Amino acid sequence: MAKTKRGRVLWSLPSRGRGTCPICNSTRIKLLYSRANAGGTIIKVCKRCSKAEQDKIDAVIP
């Protein structure tokens, strides 16, 4: 993969893929990972919270 193409897909995402993580409330962080709760609702989370326990995910999404 050429170095000029790395991260190019982020430019097409709204706000360059950045936002506030719903789990840890970090601001201006990349939200690139999807997590689902028991009901099947999917949210985007940061890298640190992508490995969070399922209980924390379920607490955020009612």
Image: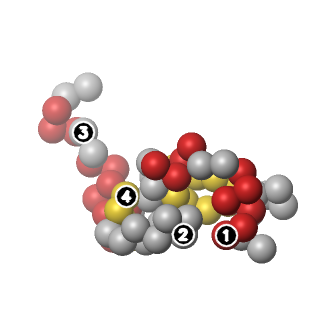
Instruction: From the top left corner, tell me how far across and down residue 22 is, in percent.
Output: 54, 69
* Residue at the disc numbered 2: 22
Q: In front: mark 2 or mark 4?
A: 2
Q: CA distance from mark 3 to mark 2?
A: 26 Å
Q: CA distance from mark 1 to mark 2?
A: 7 Å
Amino acid type shown at disc 1: Val
Q: Residues within 10 Å of mark 1 (few under 14, many from 20)?
A: few
Q: Give whichever of discs 1 and 4 has the lower sequence position.
A: 4
Q: CA distance from mark 2 to mark 4?
A: 12 Å
Task: Please give the name of the residue rendered at 61% of the width and 62% of the height, measured from the top-left corner.
Answer: 43
Q: Secondary structure at mark 2?
A: loop
Q: Are marks 1 and 2 in contact (CB under 8 Å)?
A: yes
- Asked whether the viewer can see residue 14, the reply is no
Amino acid type shown at disc 3: Arg
Q: Are marks 2 and 4 in contact (CB under 8 Å)?
A: no
- In the image, 26 versus 43, the foreground residue is 26
* Residue at the disc numbered 3: 6
Q: Is residue 15 left or right of residue 49?
A: left
* Residue at the disc numbered 4: 30
Q: CA distance from mark 3 to mark 4?
A: 15 Å
Q: Give whichever of discs 3 and 4 has the lower sequence position.
A: 3
Q: Secondary structure at mark 1?
A: helix
Indicate whether 20 appears above or below 13: below
Q: Give whichever of discs 1 and 2 has the lower sequence position.
A: 2
Indicate whether 17 appears above or below 14: above
Q: Give whichever of discs 2 and 4 has the lower sequence position.
A: 2
Q: CA distance from mark 1 to mark 4?
A: 18 Å
Q: State which quadrant residue 17 falls in.
A: bottom left
* Residue at the disc numbered 1: 60
Indicate whether 7 appears above or below 16: above
Q: Give whichever of discs 3 and 2 has the lower sequence position.
A: 3
Instruction: From the top left corner, tell me how far across and down residue 26 is, in percent.
Output: 40, 67
